[in-house]
Amino acid sequence: MELDHIGIAVRSIAEARGFYEHALQLPAEAEIEDVAGEKVRVLKLLVPPGTHIELIEPASPDSTIAKFIEKRGPGLHHLCYAVPDIVDATKHMLAKGYTPIWESAHEGAGGCLVNFFHPRETHGVLTELSQRPN
């Protein structure tokens, strides 16, 4: 298991990206991705050697990210760990007493299969497991 990315909730990718691209000099992917199932837009910023930051902007006022920003303001949203098999990793977490947010994985950004574990069970940090597409 390795850290895949850090998710940061933002009101506007256009407004937030300057800090990461200009001040921190992190290269961004060329396109902002629409993740329709989660009602968000995502910009990936590369952090060598192999992780990235995702700026996550609500695409709808009823998205989970919009509700998060409304309640807590913009900022750190989640940590994501890459796993080789999302089904096995979810079963492992269940066996250890952690409840996934969804019964089965959903498609996330970049075509990854993802599942989340609620911060109340993970010491205050929303935790995502992600299986990269083949």
Image (tube, grey):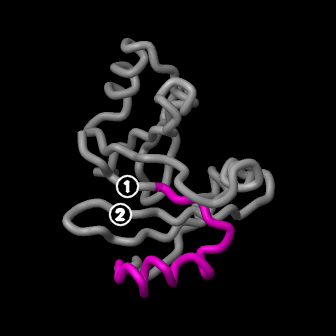
Q: Residue at x 42, y 17 (%)?
A: 94
Left or right of 37, for residue 17:
left
- Residue under numbered circle 1: 5
Inspect the image, locate mark 2, and give the three-letter code of the amino acid beneath it: His
The residue nearer to you, when weighing 126 against 82, is: 126
Disc 2 crowd, CA 10 A, few/some/many (<14, 14-19, 20+): many
The image quarter containing residue 113 is top left
Q: Mark 2 touching mark 1, by CB under 8 A?
A: yes
Q: Between marks 2 and 1, how big is the CA–CA gap? A: 5 Å
Position in image of residue 89 (x %, y %): 33, 28
Please, is residue 116 above or below residue 60 in the view? above
The residue stretch that appears in magenta: 7-26
Q: Residue at x 24, y 39 (%)?
A: 1
- Residue under numbered circle 2: 52
Inspect the image, locate mark 1, and give the three-letter code of the amino acid beneath it: His
Q: Is residue 87 one of those drawn in magenta?
A: no
User: In the structure shown, which secondary structural element does the residue marked by tag 2 occupy?
Assistant: strand
Please tell me the numbered disc located at residue 93.
Answer: none
Please, is residue 124 above or below residue 17 in the view? above
Q: Residue at x 34, y 20 (%)?
A: 92
